[in-house]
Amino acid sequence: MSTESLEIAKTRYQTGKVAFENGQYREAVENLEKASALLARNSRLGGEVEIHLVTAYEAAGRTDDAIALCERLKRHPYFETSKQARQMLYILKAPKLKRPSEWMTEIPDLGALPDNELKISVAAKSSKSSVQQKPKPTEPEFIDLSQVNTRDNRFIWVALIAIGLTISYLVWLSFSGTPG
């Protein structure tokens, strides 16, 4: 394997990982498959790429491909790769639990409404243009102090007295508890 193809494989691998982290699973699968094709399957890096490919397959809804790849990776020469493959295979083959419908929140697809398409595109354009504009500095809002209730509140005095008495009692307890 040439160093050039190794660098291409590493670049594809990183691109695939970034795509996966951004939720672009189809793109992640494409990049990880290309990286895997450039690497020796029994190498440490080849196994690492294929472990990530398993998670990308599962996220892209290709569970059968993920299971088949895990079955092959169970026999990988690197212990860590084969161990991860066995763990992932256990999870992939686990029975799917049914969730009661009352546990789920259904989010309606507002894009499917015919009159919303225009609103969505206008909202997207306005949010882009608002990001590009610098916010105008606003003047601080002055408060008319004659409108503010500044009379003493009895609760504050009661609370301060209660706090003072509590602290005094605790101080008295700490000194009276010592022999002497």
Image (tube, helix red, strand yellow):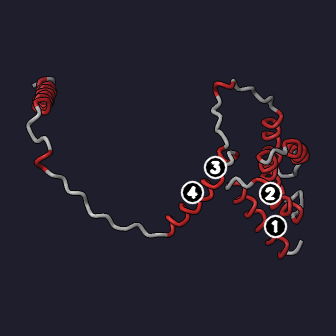
On the image, the x and y values in percent for residue 82 come to 83, 46
Amino acid identity at mark 2: Val
Left-right relation of 130 to 40: left
- Of mark 3 and mark 1, the one earlier in the sequence is 1
Residue 119 position, x and y percent, is 60, 54
User: What's the distance in space between the residues labelled 2 and 1, CA to CA?
Assistant: 9 Å
The residue that mark 1 highlights is 9
Question: Distance from label 4 to label 2 (Cα)?
Answer: 40 Å
Instruction: Tell me the quadrant of the picture where the C terminus can be found.
Output: top left
Question: Tag 4, which secondary structure?
Answer: helix
Q: Which tag, 4 or 2, sits closer to the chain's start?
A: 2
Mark 2 and mark 1 residues within 8 Å of each other at the beta carbon: yes
Q: Residue at x 68, y 25 (%)?
A: 101
Label disc, if present, on residue 49 of the rendered structure: 2
User: Which mark is drawn over residue 123?
Assistant: 4
Look at the numbered disc 2 and give the secondary structure of its residue. Answer: helix
Among numbered discs 3 and 2, the one appearing first in the sequence = 2
The front one of 40 and 163 is 163
Q: Is residue 47 left or right of residue 174?
A: right
Give the amino acid type for the residue marked by disc 1 in the picture: Ala
For the residues bearing labels 1 and 4, Cβ distance under 8 angstroms: no
